[in-house]
Amino acid sequence: MRVYTYDTTLRDGTQREGLSLSVEDKLLIVEKLDEFGIDYIEGGFPFSNPKDQQFFKEVSRLKLANSRITAFGSTRYKDKKAAEDLGLKALVKSGVSVVCIVGKTWLMQVTEVLRTTADENLRMISESIEYLKSAGLDVFFDAEHFFDGFSEDPEYALKSLMVAEEAGADCIILCDTNGGTLPVKVDEVMRQVVEEVSVRVGIHAHNDAGCAVANSLVAIEAGATQVQGTVNGYGERCGNADLCAIIPSLVLKMGRECIPVDRLSGIMDVAHFVAEVANITPDPHQPYVGISAFAHKGGQHVSAVNKTARAYEHVKPELVGNSQRIVVSELAGRSTVEKKAREMGIDLSAHPDLVGSILQAVKDKEHKGFHFEAADGSLELLIRRKLHESAEVVHLDSFRIIVEKNRDGRLDTMANVKVWLDNVLVSEYAEGNGPVNALDAALRKALLTKYPDLDGIKLADFKVRVLDESKGTEAVTRVLIESTDGETSWGTVGVSENIIEASWQALVDSLEYGLRRKKTK
């Protein structure tokens, strides 16, 4: 059966703590979701705020190929006429052809939250849908708190759905609004509802019990034909069902018609694009689309995937736009080192004696606190130095850093770096907004005369981690630096009891690796 995708990132997703999208952000995401092939994109609540009102004006100008924009609202206020309800009138004026309204199906919510009667709530559902249908709109009905309501009073919960169907709802969506229902219950209830109603049924799950994706898939297996969720599972509290996990499972595991297979490889791009627009760091361990979803670290695992990727990969990573990664650490074996080297363009088959030496060097360094999982640049330099393929660029004589705090609160930082270039001692000073920034600036000034390509290499990220916190300020510190040349990025690592020395190690590796890339190109 065809499963229709309904994305609510722009409405329910923005209820996540710390997430905010501008009108421009929303329009960018709409275009991306449309390109991917999402059926319905919920833009927001046009009655709730000026931003959403502006969005619906702007989105009507987009030429969408695959998606229909949906406006969200709720049933009319109690004891009022639907035609006079400002929220419903805003839905009609929003310019969309599809609306989704939420209504109560849990009697506790009716009496204690809405503070109205059971019968009035049913009239609110019925009259709201009838009003919207009379305006020529397709109407989806979100049955809020349905599973909780069904558990306490199944007769009333089902009656709420029947009223919605009789009023003309085109699709009824069962909502696990509190996110606490387990898959076995979702399956049982969904099967009963599908038997009772004659219109299409959907599922809207939250993740408070960690079951949102599972509940969505179970609901579809039980007869639901619409699935609501958000990109990356963004949403209030613990989030909504993650469409980036649901869609690949529907297509690759359940064989359901959903997103065309030829577009499925774009889902990782969608996930990271939305994360970037939302200014949220992507979860590396997210199923299917996380950069670690197909990463292999254990020696036995790497040895197995070298023989057949199916040994530890449940789907081909390229089907979802991802790729296999081999991670080198103290858990690595010879096959891990050999495969990782091949990824770097290094063939160690002609140097079998060096594989063991490289592996031991990695393990020794990791024991001291180095961490090569996020530092491919440092790892490649280590391997090439073992092969005598990487000449040292930075020949340090000394460096000095001065930090001065003035009476007026101003903080001045200056670094002096002395390095040998062609047997000539070069000394440079630089100021910075901190010790590492000043050190980086001084080193670059010293090297730029000989290595002008250095100007295109930038530091993109800087992370510090204390490894043995019990030692306080005497603790060993690990520094990870991410650098970029505008085309690709690489990580480097340094470890020392002195944070400046650890930073220096990572900094030197980042520049040497970047220069080597430039030279190779």
Image (spheres, rainbow, N blue to C red):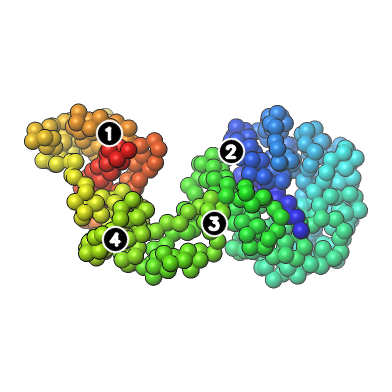
Say whether marks 1 and 4 touch (CB < 8 Å). no
Q: Is residue 453 above or below residue 470?
A: above
Neighbours of disc 4 within 10 Å: few (<14), some (14-19), many (20+): few
Residue 97 numbered tag: none
Of badges 1 and 2, nearer the viewer stands 1
Q: From the image, which quarter does the C terminus lie in?
A: top left
Determine the CA span between mark 3 and mark 1.
Answer: 36 Å
Residue located beneath label 3 in the image? 288
| Residue placed most toward the observer, 281 or 340 | 340
Determine the CA span between mark 1 and mark 4.
Answer: 33 Å
Which badge, 4 or 3, comes first in the chain's sequence? 3
Determine the CA span between mark 2 and mark 3.
Answer: 25 Å
| Residue placed most toward the observer, 506 or 457 | 457
Residue located beneath label 4 in the image? 349
Residue located beneath label 1 in the image? 454
Residue 118 location in percent, x, y? Answer: 86, 57
Neighbours of disc 1 within 10 Å: few (<14), some (14-19), many (20+): some
Q: Is residue 437 above or below residue 289?
A: above
Question: In which quarter of the view is residue 340 placed?
Answer: bottom left
Which badge, 2 or 3, comes first in the chain's sequence? 2
Determine the CA span between mark 4 and mark 3.
Answer: 32 Å
Indicate the amino acid at tag 3: Tyr
Question: In which quarter of the view is residue 348 placed?
Answer: bottom left
